[in-house]
Amino acid sequence: MALRDNAIVAYAEAKHEMRSGRDVWDYAGEILDALLERSGLEREEIDGVVFTPSATGAKTPMWSQSCLDYLGLETNFTDTTDLGGCSATGGIARAAAALDAGYCETIVLINADTPSTEDNLIMRSFHHEWADPEGLLGPPGAFGLLSRRYDHLYGLDLNALGKMAVAQRDHAVLNPNAVEKLRQPITVEDYLNSRMIADPLRLLDCVMMCDGGNGFVMMSKKRAREKGYSRFVVPTGYGERTNYKLAQNDLEPTESGHRAAGEKAFRQAGITPRDVGSFHPYDDFLIAMMIQLEMLGFCKPGQGAAFINETNLHFDGDLPLNTSGGQISAGQAGLAGGGTNLVEAVRQLFGEGGERQVKNTANALVTGIGWIPYGRNWGSSTALVLTPDA
């Protein structure tokens, strides 16, 4: 068996909310109920669950078990995919591996987090010793440094970044699940005039924390057909890389593991960047998406802005970009945020994008970014190619 022998037969997503006041397990329960309703499965048929960790519940040492307890599930297999923003895409690969190995027959994947209501995240690692004392407080500072490095090497075309911001915001306006505050159109001028956060990062470069959740049901394609599912989405290529070129003291921080992860995912799927129907990159900051375009081979390093300026990124364009608005314009539900772009890709391949439905549903490319090391690029990179009923 292989990755492509498995299928995503159902998906669900909660409304993104700022300071919802809800508990993380409340969102998880909402997602589970929605998945059972959409898939037509009985609760007893779920014998495997894959969770992403929660920034809210990170202090709980047995996250999977406590989540199962709250959801009232008894399983043969459970896992927590602890890859930060790569957890949702990484969870798909791990669920497929568990199905291939025969550990279970029906897996639910649940991503839920409520950081804007209660954030108990403690970073530890190098942060207390090296980053916090110097005033590098959180991802905006790290991505500000990354943007400054990119500007030094290639020059930073702010209009190109603004074009991405506008495209994603236009998509969020069409997405009823996006944070309501963000469902307002913007212009490139709005982006350029937004206040500075971590020079050269502006406010509209940055993601906004919120509460939310999303999830999926997976099983083998054989079982999906036996159960009568007429439509499903298949993972056909996956690549993952953590600590890309870590051992090199002269590592260039504008390079990321997406170079290696993307090559592997494209090779498995049998496609090239030119074949991608829609692109759903992890988007905590605009600069991250431009670097991913370069690392994945859509263009050469330093040519991301030129590629963006030449490409229609809207849902009806050449390369639809994060058609839900992405995390920047739909909201980042903490460590469940990686599922926001993933669930949109699945939705599009099901042909259920509504007003923002893309034309090319031959495939979709989804990526993840996980954790921010000190003075380097992000630590984990994932790339996942999906196709409808392959």
Image (cartoon, rainbow, N blue to C red):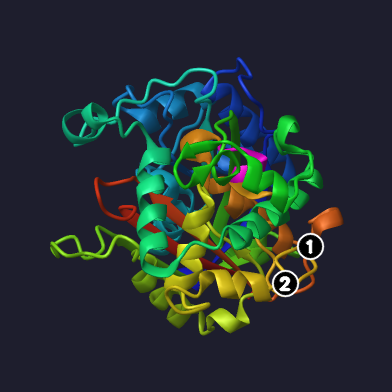
Give left or right: position of 284 versus 355: left
Residue 148 sits above or below residue 294 on the image: above
Q: Where's residue 91, x and y in %?
A: 44, 51
Dot 1, how many residues are within 10 Å of its Cα: few (below 14), some (14-19), or many (20+)? some
Q: Secondary structure at mark 2?
A: loop
Residue 349 sits above or below residue 60 on the image: below
Label 2 sits on residue: 361
Residue drawn at x 47%, y 47% is 200
Mark number displayed over residue 331: none
Label 1 sits on residue: 351
Residue 237 sits above or below residue 369 on the image: below
Magenta span of residues: 328-332
Residue drawn at x 65%, y 29% is 30
Q: Where's residue 366, x and y in %?
A: 54, 61
Q: Is residue 163 magenta?
A: no
Secondary structure of the magenta portion, mostly? helix
Q: Where's residue 307, x and y in %?
A: 59, 75
The disc, 2 or 1, on the residue closer to the chain's N-terminal end is 1
Q: Are marks 2 and 1 in contact (CB under 8 Å)?
A: yes
Residue reaching furthest to the right: 355
Q: Secondary structure at mark 1?
A: loop
Residue 138: image quadrant is top left
Q: CA distance from mark 2 to mark 1?
A: 8 Å
Give left or right: position of 244 versus 223: left
